[in-house]
Amino acid sequence: MKAVRKILIWAIAVGLSCLLIGSPSWAQETPGAEYSILSRFDQLGLSSLKEVFQPETDPIETLTVWLDGVPLFEVAAAGEFSAATRVNEIEKRLRQAARQGLQTNLPPVTWQIDPDSNLPVLSIGDRFLMTVTEQDARAGGVLSTKIRAAELEQAIEAALRRYRLERQPRFLRQQLPWAGGILLAMIMISGLLRFMRGRLVLPAASGGQPESWQGRAARDFLSPIAALRERVTVKQRRYLRDFKRWGFRLAQVAVWGGGSLVLLGLSPYTRPWQPFLLNVLRLPLIIILVIVLCYGVIRLGEVLINRLFLAVQEEALPDSVRSQRLTLRFSTFSQVSKNILATFVIIVGVLAVFARLGVDLTPLLAGAGIIGLALSLASQNVLKDIINGFFILMEDHYGVGDVIIVGDVAGFVETMNLRITQLRNEEGRLITVPNGQIGVVQNLSKDWSRVDLLIPVSLESDIDKALAIIADVAEEMRQEPDWQSLILEPPLVLGVDNLDHAGATVRLWIVTAPLKQWDVAREYRRRLKNRFDQMGIVIGVPQQTVHVHPDRTAPAVATAHQPD
């Protein structure tokens, strides 16, 4: 950061030095002190930005008269002549008078009352310029045509002097340091912005290793608030990083675009391009501004929604099962809320652009309602998906972070909205299921889970001893600190569930925390196998019995059929 500050301070110092060196001190000796540094920005025509971007609200038809890319005054329509016709004629006469002033002395600007119309008439030398009407006076913010004529006289005289002075070789030479300083400042600021944009790194979650959906879901249920806070923090950092990157890009575009407009305004020969480019770029700039505002509102809304749901979630007890379930529900509702917010903001942004284009929104909204009704009738499946998704959320069938089985597919619920549900299976495949096609749902992670083990014991082993070992191993595992928080209830040995040629099948139930049944079952199987080996208990296997009869030429074989 220290290096960035040094570069920024150095860039500002160099830019100001170039501007001060290029300041035309000779202008202080020239009549007309309007060429000082403070008034230079008005000379560049930047004061017309407000006029260019401000929509017309005055019922009087008015247009601006320009000379050399600098706005002079407003004129209104008069009689059968429109404002555009009057502006074209006045600008043409002003240019003729200005060119004449380059070769000879500047012609005087005068006005006098026309006896026929009783209105002031402006003239440059002996050439007629315009008649000041009452509409012109109102456009200038005054009520008297004589006062308006006096104001226009001064404005036109200053414009003609400026026209002549700016075309002197000495003035053009003095503009070169200004152009060099502005160009150097543009390059340095753009390079600094690019350097700062390159220093932004993508935040990563803790650990940095990919997780399976089982591991991710189990971790979330073990510490739901901590996991939710971690995801919210990572998302907020990623949003902030993306917003900064876009901000730096837009700042670079603004630096080069604004600097180019300023450079065009330094010379009287290129300054007329300023209002032309501003008028051409007005609509694209408005659209870009709306897009940037919508993007910012969506990102800000997502951050606020995350913080809101996180604050509500922290009101629950972190270790309670209810808190775990609320975490999943809040995550799902926050995601759906973000989608609704994004859709609403985009619609408002589009309507704002149409309104700025002058489109009447009343028939547009009415037509959109009719089209929406027609589409709703044609898209009954989409409506079914949305309605079914709404009831899934309200009735808490499942949420983001659950592991469910829907029909022939199963996986971790990664994304959910009112229309679709996306599952991530064990192979990493993303499965998209429309909510309208979801009927029977098996939720493997709601509130609690269960280990259901069928343990075959050999018929030659002591079944009572085997039952005691199965119960002891489960209870010992439950008493250990590492597994005590995962096993919610005392293990239950149901007894011999089946007796056949493979042995005696013992059923064991262990109630665990949601999505921890796989970890508990794996560890329990390992411990039980070691204990059976120590105590001489044999795992049951399918058996065959062969009977041999010596009085027969071929042995008769009785085979115990294995179950399918």
Image (cartoon, rainbow, N blue to C red):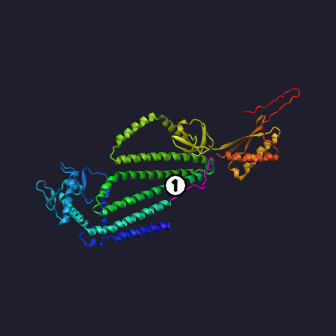
Q: Is residue 143 visible?
A: no
* In-front residue for pair 102/225: 102
Lateral position of residue 394 relative to residue 111, left or right? right
Image quadrant containing the C terminus:
top right
Lateral position of residue 206 relative to residue 23, left or right? right
Residue 275 in the image: x percent, y percent?
Answer: 30, 56
Q: Residue furthest right?
A: 551
Residue 209 magenta-highlighted:
yes
Q: Amino acid under label 1?
A: Arg
Residue 375 in the image: x percent, y percent?
Answer: 43, 36
Q: How many marks?
A: 1
* In-front residue for pair 442/52: 52
* In-front residue for pair 322/227: 227
Which residue is drawn at the image coordinates 13% and 61% (left, top)? 126
Residue 70 in the image: x percent, y percent?
Answer: 27, 60
Local packing at callout 1 (Cα closer than 10 Å; few below 14, some 14-19, many 20+) is some
- The region drawn magenta spans 200-215
Please, what is the dominant secondary structure of the magenta stretch? loop
Residue for badge 1: 238
